[in-house]
Image: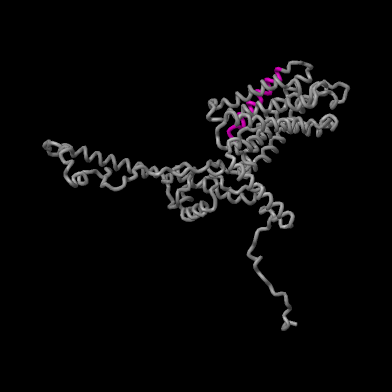
Amino acid sequence: MIPTKTEILQQAPQQAEHEKQAQEEFDLEAGRVESSLNPNKISDALRTAQQDREFRLLRRYTGQNVGGPDLGRRSSVASNQARPSLSDRFGKIDRQNSVAGSHTANLGKLDSVQEQRTPDEGEHANEEGWLADHAGADTPVHDGSEPEEWVEDPDELKPYDPELDEIHNLHTYWSVIRLKFREPLAELLAMTCQLTIGFAADLVVTTSGSSATTNANWAWGLASMIGIYIAGGISGAHLNPAVSIMLWIFRGFPLRKIPGYAFAQLLGAFLASLIAFGLYRTSIIEFAGNADMATSGTSSAFVTHPQHSYIDASTAFFTEFVGTAILAVVVLALGDDSNAPPGAGMNAFIMGLVITVLLMAFGANTGLALNPARDFGPRLALLALGYGKANTFPSAYWFWGAWCGPIAGALFGAFLYDGAIFVGGESPVNYPRKRIKRAMRKKKAKWGRRFKKVATGGLSVPMPLRRPRYASDDWHFDHREDESVM
């Protein structure tokens, strides 16, 4: 509940001190509340911030100033200068109007001034000290010394960190958790939407007995476009573990983010399979008839495999390899600023067309996964739905075809693009040989130290697993019995 004006005036000193202390402890709207799975740890911060927002809101609209610092909504790009209140601004305008009115009233009382000739600066060019005497306050004077720097030094550029620089309205416990896992959540949502549409389109073709695979190809392309639009501005819309690994090696994507991205992508594929199966369960049962649902052939709408008996292992592998290599080349080309990138919002549309074309060209051999998560997640879902291991993991194709093929193809495609076109320094293709040798020596020394620690049994416990240190740890007690008491 918003407090009244009387309550604000009565609690002004305490509230100002409270806001000052709260500002020093945390900055809620800038996202500096440590996320935790325990809601009790952040509930106090959220409750305090809610009370502060209520007081600041009412003071802003009533023009009251309780003497405390201005703790209103802030951002990293906002000016540090405090805004004047409405009363101050209107008072300043009234004073200016009164001064202007007095000058207007005195215009008729001024005496006439005889015009005089303004001396030319050229006449006094040789007179010593004339320029210094007649120069204005803002006119620089050169005395023969080093030229003065008139332009201020630019502000130091700092790397953009969305978790620290953006303004986040952390009003609830979930908002704090969402800020911590915003990128994986975006991957999860986009992956679920994309694959739900794709699996549903494949089920329509399979259960209807139609051969209109072109419709399914277009559905997959447009579904990919939708997924990229959903997560493109948050996580980059990788939607593919092979793309994440490729960007880590060739574009410096943080390695620590790959496990979270991959887990979100696999979970999204798993959920999308369950959703599509639930929507078309009756159609699948009707299509299977008296036969077992697991052996009805509907699993081909979810997972990829060689479509015909004459498709050998090498053909299946290189189908995934070549298709993903072309996909990686297009991804890097769209992100290359020196290679005529498309306009804003066009990347998703172009990627949708590319995936449609790839499915039309290479889908006849294996169904073309292009994505390890798109194949492995549905296998786990079908296994949970009772399709059995014989229908979900009949061979090792799920590993060498759906995992090794796309990952190897993505890396090879990135190598081809960087070797032929890309000129940026973040690619290892453009590393100098000395830099590569230095990096290899550092890696070798780093892993050598780790193996040495493991061999000697001195492997330290990770910091998050250590017990926090307390002051009582330094206390020492004498456990000897007191003889006088005895």
Please state the horizontal and vertical placement of residue 344, each as a whole percent of the image.
Answer: 54, 27
Look at 48% across and 42% down and name the residue there. 157
Please state the horizontal and vertical placement of residue 184, each as a whole percent of the image.
Answer: 65, 38
Task: Check residue 473 for magenta coloring.
Answer: no
Q: Is residue 407 left or right of residue 347?
A: right
> Which stretch is magenta?
214-234
In this view, 353 is above or below 439: above
Q: Main secondary structure of the magenta part?
A: helix
Residue extending furthest toward the bottom: 484
Quarter residue 425 falls in: top right
The quadrant of the picture occupied by the C terminus is: bottom right
In this view, 458 is above or below 426: below
Q: Is residue 414 left or right of residue 458?
A: left
Q: Is residue 352 left or right of residue 160?
A: right
Residue extending furthest toward the left: 114
Task: Check residue 226 for magenta coloring.
Answer: yes
Please state the horizontal and vertical placement of residue 152, each as a whole percent of the image.
Answer: 38, 44
The quadrant of the picture occupied by the N terminus is: top right
Please state the horizontal and vertical placement of residue 145, each as a whole percent of the image.
Answer: 29, 48
Residue extending furthest toward the top: 211
Quarter residue 339 falls in: top right
Q: Is residue 80 left or right of residue 91?
A: right
